[in-house]
Every structure is written in C-alpha cells, then in structure tokens.
Image (cartoon, grey):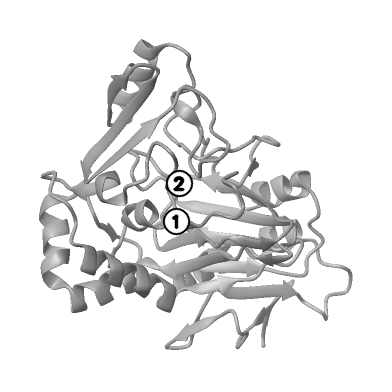
Amino acid sequence: MAEVNLFSEVVGLQQQKSDSGVFFPAVLFPNPNASKPVQLTDAIKANKPWLDSLLHRSGAILFRGFPVSTASDFNDVVDSSGYEDFSYGAGGSGTRTKLTDRVYTANEAPPDQMIGFHHELSHASEFPSKLFFFCEIEPGRGGETCIVLSHVIYEKMNGKHPEFVEQLEEKGLIYNRVMREGLDPSSPVGRGWKGTFMTDDKSVAEERATKLGMKLEWMGDEVKVIVGPKPSFRYNEAQQQKTWFNSLAISYGGLHDKLNDDPTKAVVFGDGEPLPRDEVNDLLKMFDEECVALQWCKGDVLLLDNLAVLHSRRPLLAPSRRILASFCK
C-alpha cells in the first residue's frame, strides 16, 4: 500500500487488472493516518500533479471511502480537479438531466438494458477528454460500469484480424440512426431530434447538425441522422498508442429500439459496405474478456481518461441504481 499525502493507494483488489506494475483502475482511499477526516476535494487539490500522472499511467482512478453524498458534493469534487467544463449540449443523443452547474444524470436508458462499450462522443467533432462518474445510489445487483483500455483492444484486434483493422483504417465508419421527434424513454438513446439538436425548428436542427458533421434525412417527423465517414481509430499522443476510438461496439451492444433494431445498418464501413459479423462478434467477446467490471459502492467517484478508456453499462438486475456524470475538456 503506497501513501501519498491524503491518499492511500490500494492494489491487488479483485476489481483491478495489472500490467507491468500499473494497476487498472488505480484505487485510492482516504489516508488512514491523516490527522483529520479527509475530504476528497482537499485531497485532489493537494495532490493534483500526482493524480494527473497517475491518470496518465493507469487511465482510470476510483476514489472510494470519501464523504461524497450528493450531486452538489460531486460538483465540488469535479471543480476541485481544475479541469475545464465540457458542456453536454447539442449532438449527444443519450437522455440526461442536468442537476447542477457541472453534473448530469448518467444515461437514463432503461436500467435493464445494456449500454455497449464506447468513448464518450467519439462520433462527434468535439468530445470530452476526461469523465467523472459518481455513485449516489448503490445498485442492488448488476448495473456494473465496465471499463477497458482502448489500446489493448486495438492491439488484440490487429493481431487477430489485421485485414479487418486495415479496412477500418482505410474506410472509416458511417453511423446511422433514426430519431423520433420527442423523447423516447424506452430507448437507450431516446433524446429525440428536438432534444439532440436543442430546437423545435427543422432548419435550425439541420444547421446544428452540419456544424457537428452530421447529415439529416427527414422522414415526416422522424429523421435519419448520418455521421461520417469517421476515423475508426485515434492516435493517443500522450500515451503514444493507437486506440479503438469509435462507436462500433455500442452500436452492436445495446443501442436498439423500435426505430433502430438492426445493428448491421446502424454502423457500416465508410463505403457503405456491411461489417463482417464474425470479426464483430470476436470484438464484442474481446471487450468482455479484457474489461474490468466495477461494482459500485455508494459515494464512489470514478475518473476516466476518455481518450484512453472505453466504458459500458451492464443491465441492472435488482433495483435501484443512480449514477451521476460530469464531462471535462
């Protein structure tokens, strides 16, 4: 156990993977030898350079055992990081409620549905570099947030299916999704086009879609949103590694509703050709094999490097669960 000022770093937990002495995620508890109860905001401010270095090495930090209870507390934790706010505005299709200046509900998709692996807003022209999550209500059973290192997925897929990876590199990906006019609470991405583009006016929606690199095809009050071709991978300059920076897995791993029930149409190669199913199945299995499934405890705060780590949500098997989120530039 290594101590740094107000933190104690704990290693060897069941919810961790280790590679060359680097643990994923890093897990930090309050230092039990501190002279007074440790506030997470104080600990972050006092150890910011070390935390940045730890996040760079690990990709994810789980803060556990700190007195964080409410959305307001969580907002203070995010503020204490010094990271600039990334507003979850037009373009994001997940249903969220803004609770404080910097805090939203996590995706409000029906809790019994899976949300597949993804980098937050990887399909968009702008995306957050860091994500915070906070467990306000601990899940009864299930509902784990799963995380995986993106460069590991890229390297393993490139080793097993180099031709597929080469096609993805050359062609990129196109994402297609049909949106209804208003909110669909039964959908994992049920924001509707009015909520997604934050307007009731179709012409304004088209202007905002264009700025976001999206094309719209209207079908009455519904609209087909086309994104891409977009790059399938991204080179992480900080880590000097190529990452699996796309939304392929989430398109196959849970983004289904009444208007979007065929994943083979939801994401295709940049030339419009369908993706090979065997390779996609291997990818989904690889995510399950390589991920860490975090079982939430009330008060947990999770910090992710969105450029290095993909995340997903497993179905909730026993109520209830309430996870909050914040996004940083």
Q: Is there CB contact under 8 Å for labels 1 and 2?
A: yes
Horizontal side of residue 232 vs 90, given as left or right = left
Residue extending farthest to the right is 36
Q: Is residue 37 above or below residue 249?
A: below
Horizontal side of residue 167 vs 289, given as left or right = left
Q: Amino acid at mark 1?
A: Asn
Horizontal side of residue 113 vs 99, given as left or right = left
> Is residue 183 visible in this depiction of the protein?
yes
Q: Quadrant of residue 156?
A: bottom left
**Residue that appears at 19% across and 56% down:** 275
Crowd class of label 2 (few under 14; some 14 to 19; many from 20; radius 10 Å): many
Q: Amino acid at mark 2?
A: Pro
Q: Earlier in the sequence, mark 1 or mark 2?
A: 2
Estimate the x, y position of residue 19 in percent, counting from the top left: 43, 85
Estimate the x, y position of residue 163 in percent, counting from the top left: 10, 68
Q: Which mark is residue 306?
A: 1
| Disc 1, SS | loop
Q: Which mark is residue 128?
A: 2
**Residue that appears at 54% across and 54% down:** 113
Q: Is residue 289 above or below residue 87?
A: below
Q: Nearer the viewer, residue 135 or 301?
A: 135
| Disc 2, SS | loop
